[in-house]
Image (spheres, helix red, strand yellow):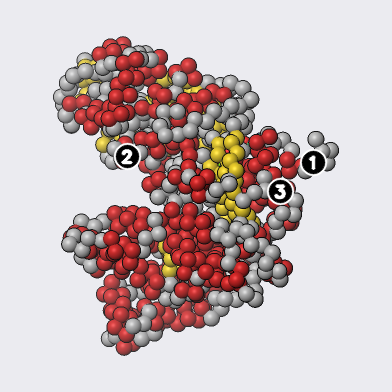
Amino acid sequence: AEPTESPLLAGLNPQQREAVEYRGQALLIVAGAGSGKTSVLTRRVASLIETRDAWPSQILAITFTNKAAAEMRERVEALLGQAAQGMWISTFHSACVRILRREAEHFGFGKNFTIYDSADSRALIKRIIKDLDADTFGFTVSGVAGKISKLKNELSDVESYARGANFNDPQERVFLDIFREYTRSLSSANAFDFDDLIGQTVYLFRAFPQVAALYQRRFRHILVDEYQDTNHAQYSLIRELTQPPRTDLLGGATGFDGSLLSNPTKHLEPASLTVVGDSDQSIYAFRGADIRNIVEFERDFPNSKVVLLEQNYRSTQNILSAANAVISNNFDRKDKKLFTTIGEGDKIVGFTGYSQHDEAQFIADEITELHAQGLEYRDMAVFYRTNAQTRALEEIFIRSALPYRVLGGTKFYERAEIKDAFGYLIAVANPADPMALRRILNTPKRGIGGVTEAALQSYADHHGVTLREALRHADEMGFGPKITGAILRLGATLDEVALTADTAPVADILTALLTKTGFVEALRASRDPQDEARAENVEELVAVTKEFNKNNPEGTLLDFLTETSLVAAADDLDDSSGTVSLMTLHTAKGLEYEAVFLTGIEEDLLPHRMSANEPGGPAEERRLFYVGITRARRKLYLSLAMTRAQFGDVSVAMPSRYLQEIPPELIEWRQSPGMANSRGGTQARALNARRGGFGVESSGPSLGAGYAGSVGPGATALARAARAAQPKTEWANKVTNTVRDNGDLSLAAGDRIRHVDFGDGRVTAVTGVGPKSVAEVQFESAGRKRLLIKISPIEKL
Ligand code: ATP
Ligand code: MG
């Protein structure tokens, strides 16, 4: 080996090293979780610069979250120092915003465009559905939003949709009207929705080859992480950027980098493309992600090189074996064998709680124990399938005084008062946007109600001006003097502050708006105690703008709006904080923790009941489970509850079908203390044998049929075969041991019962029928409880 080898290659295995050093046109790195894909991408970026194969400005690296981008930038800086400046390391969305801010004027948008987040899009759709009376055709906001988003991800627009539409179908005609109106509203508001950011950039490149040429020529090296989750629009963007640059179109154009354009014939070959991904971790099909993008990479990019990474550096052998076993149940995949040298490690811990509170209590106790053993809170994470699961966890965490934070819950930027404050900023930045203006018309209260707003809008429509312009004509609309005065004052304030929008620091702009309009003052003066907290949040936002000004002395209002509009769930992570992280499985992608708790491993949650009956649904949910398992470095916990209250209803939960796929010897099952000695164990075992060995009694036909029936014919047969082959797996025993079945125990108001934990009590009411019957019991010392009769540890006295 060379004595003076680059430190960039230190510690890499031969395949990783090959991927870092390869210099051909197209490189595909496929590998399972934790094999160093993201690390290799980072080193490759650094290597390209170190070997002088690229200038920083010629690199475009796409990551999945802004946080991942910031991390990659930090690591490249650590490896290279200042040289990392000028690189584009960002998400698809922020890269496209940067391009659009520069180029949107080519196709009729202003560079001060607003970005509508999904709440904004929904508000607009709601309005349109109402205006068009489309709800009478059965259209709902989420139905329409989902369909439009799907179309945009496929790069379909109103015209192309209309070409394929069936005009005899009134539903389709109405949808087309909605879609058209939505598109028109966005463009007249000078706004893009999230999906547009990518779709419109592709459109820009296709419609204006000279613009495309600039970027094709600028970016010589494009690198994409998590390629398995790209959708068609993102894929098309990559295709556009990797076309041979049309240097003939550039002529004497001034580019981004004078030194490059001084020799226009120098770089004619297309940009090099590196993508890394793992088709087993594709979890965004519902958002249009297309696994074929990675599967067909070799066909799309002939002469591409493929590197496989097989060593996992993250997890213990037990965790890895569980992950491998689960994912091998998916068909249509290339089998990858990951190995690790970390060692077997601890067994995976399984826990079945009596209720979701019991489950949460177990997790809180374990976290406390791990912390006492020296593990930092920030090295632990709890994952769940649905946001609704956080409530029970949070309750117990608060009671146990555990520091935690929920990622992607109601985010700071989604709070109403913060959106109001942003409404002011956007109204100043983009006067064409009526959405922002509507939000603040009557915030703080100025007596501008729905009727006044409608009159302003109709004036705007009638005179062909923006809503903002209409404010200036309030005195022509016959309003009373008080309202007229309020509207004129608001318009004047916005106009006045707008004069400084391009130059003043954002903090000054925000402060001016908040004081001139009395926004914070109104919150402070309110008698609603919530308003105090709201005022503090708004002040926190002022602090955020000051911070922004400090870090970006040149940063404008538009820069600030861009940065804050693209914050994604995983971006609120702050590793330095000593808190346990709670997040959905989707948000967990790409992250790693010493200890991971996977909760609610039950049918209807994982797989989620919405996806269980969809083609490909159970396979995608299995990948989600695989993603969850592979986040863990040393400790993995799988927990479930026997009953779960959801949508105000208590139902019996069944263990997830995926649990059965983990070899039983890898899991050590623990039980809820209250159940360990319950006599239900034997009964459940007997019941279990009767039913062919698997699972817990279900709460009704939907669940009972669900297990075998929802998987599709092939899988049903398989499930049956699996059950026949293993009439009593160790696993099934362990789980069902903890489950009790009271058979047909019938209770009526007035009966006296005894409960293992709560003691004696009297039944006050019984609701529901059959296995779903719930007894309301007044206990002598434990107070009032609602119990699912079938499985509660109770006996009739
Ligand atoms: P995922 O599929 O979950 O996104 P990944 O393939 O991107 O995973 P990384 O996150 O890059 O994997 O790496 C996983 C862990 O392994 C990280 O902690 C990383 O620092 C470590 N790692 C990667 N390569 C090596 C190596 N050659 N030597 C030691 N540690 C490594
Ligand atoms: Mg990764």
Q: Look at mark 1 in the image and give the residue it sits on.
A: 5
Pointer 1 residue Cβ closer than 8 Å to ligand 1: no
Q: Amino acid at mark 2?
A: Pro
Which of disc 2 and disc 3 is earlier in sequence? Answer: 3
Q: Position of residue 733 (x, y in %)?
A: 37, 15
| Res. 517 image quadrant | bottom left
Which of the labelled discs sits on residue 411, or is there none? Answer: none
- Please report the residue visible at 47 percent of the width from the left and 25 percent of the height from the top: 325
Q: Is residue 115 above or below residue 685?
A: below
Of the 4 image quadrants, the one containing the C terminus is top left
- Residue 717 visible somewhere in the drawing: yes
Q: Look at mark 3 in the image and give the residue it sits on.
A: 47
Q: Position of residue 424 (x, y in %)?
A: 46, 70
Q: Position of residue 441 (x, y in %)?
A: 37, 73
Label 1 and label 2: CA atoms lie apart by: 51 Å
Which of the labelled discs sits on residue 615, or is there none? Answer: 2
Within-10-Å neighbours for mark 1: few <14, some 14–19, many 20+ = few
- Residue 652 visible somewhere in the drawing: no
Question: Which of 691 and 634 lies nearest the eye of the viewer?
Answer: 691
- Please report the residue visible at 28 percent of the width from the left and 75 percent of the height from the top: 454
| Res. 283 image quadrant | top left
Question: Which of 638 and 221 lies nearest the eye of the viewer?
Answer: 221
Within-10-Å neighbours for mark 3: few <14, some 14–19, many 20+ = many
- Please report the residue visible at 39 percent of the width from the left and 28 percent of the height from the top: 658
